[in-house]
Image (cartoon, grey):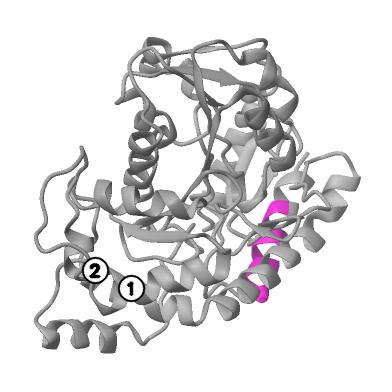
Amino acid sequence: MEYTFNRSPFTGKEAKHLANVMKSGKICGDGLYTKRCNQWIEEKTGAAGAYLTTSCTQALEMSALLTEIRPGDEVILPSYTFVSTANAFALRGAQLVFVDIRPDTNNIDETLIEGAITDKTKAIVPVHYAGVGCEMDTICAIAAEHGLTVIEDAAQGVMAFYKGRALGSIGDYGCFSFHETKNYSMGEGGAILIKDPQKTDMAEIVREKGTDRSRFLRGQVDKYSWVSIGSSYLPSELNAAYLWPQLEMAEEINQARLVCWNRYFEDLRDLQEAGRIRLPVIPAECEHNAHMFYLKTADLEERTRLIAWLKEQGVQAVFHYVPLHSARAGKLYGRFHGEDRYTTKESERLVRLPMYYGLTPEDVGSIAERIHAFFAQK
């Protein structure tokens, strides 16, 4: 049997909700399903406001606009992340300041942030890798001391928590992804979460092309006009309708993924104990969402051989980010602060294994057997 790396989540109820939208005649954004999804996010996270967007990329871009990032500002972030995290701020003219990651979680090393702050620093952007929370208490305390905005890239963090608080709801802004590779999907999509109730009106304006159209539709103003800069960040109502049945089953989907994640961990634990691989670390204060399961090999050469071996055995495994500071654009728009002790080293060791809703514990057991077979060769 062959195992693909990812399958987009599907409940079987999507077609019914899509048909409802088409019958309603309203397929543009902010219809019934968009409002349902927004409300679900607010209730699950405690955010003062939550708004679906066309992608997590655009949620990040909205956060840059709301933070009033301008040319010459600096933004601190990890280099081990997807390019959208950086693009959102580089587009506004900011200088990217990359700092090293922790080798246990692959998250930004919170102890290195303060040393990277200058009088130009405007924001800190922690990325919750694999749905495992960054050390947010420390990060938020540093931000408060220096008057900085915290923007959480929680693309992988839906239904994950840090000290009981939902990822994406702890900083000033949080950004979710509902891309087809995520735990809950609308194909392409995302959401921005707002912590301060006083900033929700401006978030609506930025999301509505810089107009106060949302206030007009609620009858709060007698006409709407252009009041600020913004863009069109609203997804189609069809996308929201596809997402909604998954959010209704969010707990079930989450638990099914966790069962498979735990099976991977148990089946591969002996290889870690033998010193052959490293498995994910979940800090005690974090509740993860089984967004991904990965292992770390000894080095890049062993990782390359393992991925090739698994492909021959019918298992699609992949590696993840090439550190942004090593890329051409990363060198052009940013700099790495301090020493790269772990970012490159850990990125070259990491292998992501198949993980999706619909994968079974038996599937995981079969994949784990093939991994054991690879290491038994030596």
In the picture of the structure, the residue carrying the numbered disc 1 is 35
Q: Label 2 sits on what residue type?
A: Asp
Front-most of 11 and 44?
44
How dense is the environment of label 2, judged by Cα within 10 Å: few (below 14), some, or many (20 and up)? Answer: many
Q: Are marks 1 and 2 in contact (CB under 8 Å)?
A: yes
Which structural element holds mark 1? helix
In the rendered structure, the answer to whether residue 143 lies left or right of residue 214 reads right
Q: Please, is residue 317 above or below residue 319 in the view?
A: below
Q: How many marks?
A: 2
Residue 183 shows up from this direction: yes
In magenta segment, residue 337? no
In magenta segment, residue 368? yes
Distance in Å between CA atoms under marks 1 and 2: 6 Å
Prevalent SS, magenta region? helix
Quadrant position of residue 224: bottom left
Q: Position of residue 144 (x, y in %)?
A: 64, 31
Q: Position of residue 105 (x, y in %)?
A: 71, 40
In the rendered structure, the answer to whether residue 256 lies left or right of residue 219 reads right
Q: Position of residue 378 (x, y in %)?
A: 78, 38
Q: Residue at x 36, y 72 (%)?
A: 243
Front-most of 84 and 65?
65
